[in-house]
Amino acid sequence: MQEIDDNSASKQAKVTVLTDDIITINGKKYHLVENHENGFDEEKIEERFNTVLEKYDYIVGDWGYDQLRFKGFYEDDRPESGMDNKISHLEDYLIEYCNFGCAYFVLEKENKSSIKKHHKRNTRRPRKKRPNSSAVHNKHNNKKPHSNTNNRRRASTSKFKIRKIGEKSK
């Protein structure tokens, strides 16, 4: 039988309220930007906070069915931010994913990570040119390869005539 380490099972975040709008979570300083309907609850944050959230510039905590849940957001100009986790989309998140009128809070990290500039590298190898498979096939069968002009000509000699709506057919 395996023993469970008490420290790992009951790991809680350490939340300290410094002023009305400045708190620390695990030693990192945050500003309480918004506290809608008194959604900020120090004890529940200590219970539910996950260190994964520390990478985000903003942390939003919202309440639904007496449960606190978190969502992380980045500054809009951060390269790692997607459409769904840019802070400019906070209102969309609150409307679409939160209960109407729910209590929530928004924390902004004081020392945000510097914005990294992404330089895309061309990591793909250049493709080797392969002969056109239809041209190779046609060379063996002594047939001409199809061209786009033939396809256009075929389309124009269709047996169907396009008529305007309301025009009587002959």
Image (spheres, rainbow, N blue to C red):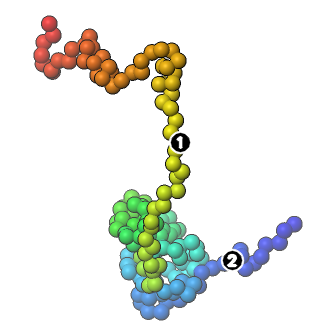
Residue 48 lies, in percent from the top left, at: 57, 73
Depth check: give the residue in front, 79 or 4.
79
Task: Determine if residue 87 is in view.
Answer: no
> How far is the residue under mark 1 from the one under mark 2?
57 Å
Depth check: give the residue in front, 5 or 131.
131
Query: Looking at the rendering, in which quadrant would you find the C terminus?
Result: top left
Disc 2 marks a residue whose amino acid type is Ser
- The answer to whether 102 appears left or right of 50 in the picture is left
Q: Are marks 1 and 2 in contact (CB under 8 Å)?
A: no
Using a 10 Å C-alpha cutoff, classify the residue at mark 2 as few (fewer than 14 neighbours), some (14 to 19) or many (20 or more).
few
Depth check: give the residue in front, 61 or 160.
160
The dot on residue 10 is 2
Disc 1 marks a residue whose amino acid type is Lys
Task: Determine if residue 73 is in view.
Answer: yes
Residue 29 lies, in percent from the top left, at: 49, 86
Q: Residue at x 44, y 92 (%)?
A: 19
Q: Is residue 132 above or below residue 102?
A: above
Say which element carries label 1: loop
Q: Residue at x 50, y 69 (%)?
A: 70
The dot on residue 142 is none
Q: Is residue 153 above or below residue 91?
A: above
Say which element carries label 2: loop
Q: Residue at x 41, y 87 (%)?
A: 21
Residue 34 is drawn in which quadrant? bottom left
The dot on residue 128 is 1
Q: Earlier in the sequence, mark 1 or mark 2?
A: 2
Q: How many marks?
A: 2
Residue 38 lies, in percent from the top left, at: 41, 79
Outermost residue, left side: 167
Depth check: give the residue in front, 26 or 142.
142
Q: Residue at x 52, y 56 (%)?
A: 123
Residue 104 lies, in percent from the top left, at: 42, 73
